[in-house]
């Protein structure tokens, strides 16, 4: 039976649900994996994850559709990206087919926690893995744990469709040839000071620039960025140091194939920000969150779409993407994974 939760008022936070998935890596292989009720992780005080941050994670969601099915959105791409993250961190990738099976198992086990259609909430799915045995010298662990927990969530930014304000920080997120393109926990650890500082100064998020030249727009701490030009072109930063967002790749496809717009991935310079008419953050957690203002030190850029609502194009992108996810609009082949 569906849990008794005030679905419409959920924020983006952790809620302990009934079940999680666990598999352990030892002696060169992953264990068969199981669903458990135990939400506690017990590892060595010297575990590689605790000392040297050897961990990566993923984020995806399960939705209840219009016709009451439970589905995930392109989880095969999360499986693949997690394998890429693991390789970059010298961890053994969790097999992609098993990742999909584990997602299915953990969502099925927690089916009563999947928010109802139309509630505005969804079930966030958090796969993650970490080096679990004791490591003193700087080297990879020998043993790992792969887990998935789930939590019902609402909008990432309070107010949902209310435009937010970004600032260009003096901190960098990712080094050239570093780990910005993978979902390593360390990328988030080093963003914590910048986000606390942004919040203290009244901004919702940081819009990072490329750390090599500090002239090009990259992404925020937890989402990619899209812009709309005055000619209704959808543009997004091309960079080897940002996370390849599955939401952004999907939106670019939607712009081109569903809305008939030109969609371009290219380098975007900070000094062209005043030319755009709309801006939004995109990601699993952020979905599509409109941006109303960008502050780049002394320069304040007010997007013509304003501080009250989505711009016209970003609204259409939002409606189409969420329509596909919730089963109101036909999805491209292979995008919807039924649980
Ligand atoms: N960029 C960063 C740094 C993120 O943490 C995320 C979240 O996963 C994204 C972008 C968006 O990626 P996706 O759309 O695959 O969730
Ligand atoms: C996601 O969108 O899934 C993320 O991981 C972003 C953030 C919560 C870290």
Image: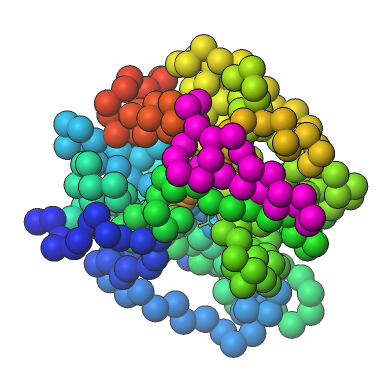
Instruction: Name which residue lies at 59% across and 53% down.
Output: 165
Q: Quadrant of residue 178?
A: bottom right
Q: Could you say where residue 200 lies in the image, as x and y percent from the top left? A: 62, 72
Q: Is residue 126 magenta?
A: no
Residue 280 at least partly seen: yes
Instruction: Name which residue lies at 80% across and 62% down.
Output: 170
Instruction: Name which residue lies at 61% across and 38% down.
Output: 303
Decide which of 263, 93 is in the foreground and name it. 263
Number of marks in the rendered image = 0
For the record, the magenta segment spans: 289-314
Decide which of 27, 313 is in the foreground and name it. 313
Question: Which residue occupies the extreme right position in the image?
Answer: 213
Classify the position of the N terminus by image quarter. bottom left
Left or right: residue 269 compared with residue 310: right
Residue 220 at least partly seen: no
Left or right: residue 35 compared with residue 56: left
Classify the position of the C terminus by image quarter. top left
Can you say whether 43 is above or below 248 in the image?
below
Left or right: residue 169 compared with residue 292: right
Q: Quadrant of residue 106?
A: bottom left
Q: Is residue 299 magenta?
A: yes
Q: Quadrant of residue 137?
A: bottom right
Left or right: residue 214 compared with residue 264: right
Q: Could you say where residue 216 lies in the image, as x and y percent from the top left? A: 81, 42
Q: Could you say where residue 64 lies in the image, as x and y percent from the top left? A: 24, 41
Question: Which residue occupies the extreme top position in the image?
Answer: 260
């Amino acid at each position: 039976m569906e849990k008794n939760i005030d679905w419409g008022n959920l924020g983006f936070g952790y809620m302990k649900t009934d079940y999680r998935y666990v598999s352990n890596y030892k002696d060169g292989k992953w264990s068969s994996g199981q669903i458990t009720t135990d939400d506690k992780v017990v590892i060595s005080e010297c575990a590689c994850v605790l000392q040297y941050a050897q961990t990566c994670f993923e984020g995806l969601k399960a939705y209840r559709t219009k016709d009451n099915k439970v589905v995930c959105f392109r989880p095969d791409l999360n499986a693949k990206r997690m394998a890429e993250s693991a390789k970059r961190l010298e961890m053994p990738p969790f097999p992609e087919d098993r990742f999909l099976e584990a997602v299915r198992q953990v969502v099925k086990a927690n089916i009563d926690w999947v928010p109802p259609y139309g509630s505005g909430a969804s079930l966030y799915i958090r796969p993650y893995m970490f080096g679990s045995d004791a490591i003193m010298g700087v080297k990879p662990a020998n043993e790992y744990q792969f887990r998935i927990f789930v939590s019902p969530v609402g909008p990432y930014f309070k107010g949902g469709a209310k435009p937010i304000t970004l600032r260009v920080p003096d901190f960098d997120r990712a080094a050239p040839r570093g780990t910005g393109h993978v979902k390593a926990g360390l990328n988030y650890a080093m963003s914590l000071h910048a986000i606390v500082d942004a919040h203290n100064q009244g901004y919702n998020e940081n819009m990072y620039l490329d750390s090599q030249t500090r002239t090009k727009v990259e992404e925020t701490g937890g989402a990619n960025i899209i812009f709309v030009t005055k000619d209704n072109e959808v543009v997004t930063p091309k960079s080897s140091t940002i996370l390849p967002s599955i939401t952004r790749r999907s939106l670019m496809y939607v712009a081109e194939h569903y809305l008939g717009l030109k969609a371009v991935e290219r380098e975007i310079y900070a000094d062209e920000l005043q030319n755009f008419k709309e801006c939004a953050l995109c990601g699993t957690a952020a979905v599509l969150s409109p941006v109303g203002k960008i502050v780049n030190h002394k320069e304040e850029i007010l997007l013509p779409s304003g501080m009250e609502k989505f711009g016209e194009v970003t609204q259409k992108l939002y409606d189409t993407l969420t329509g596909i996810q919730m089963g109101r609009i036909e999805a491209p082949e292979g995008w919807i994974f039924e649980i």
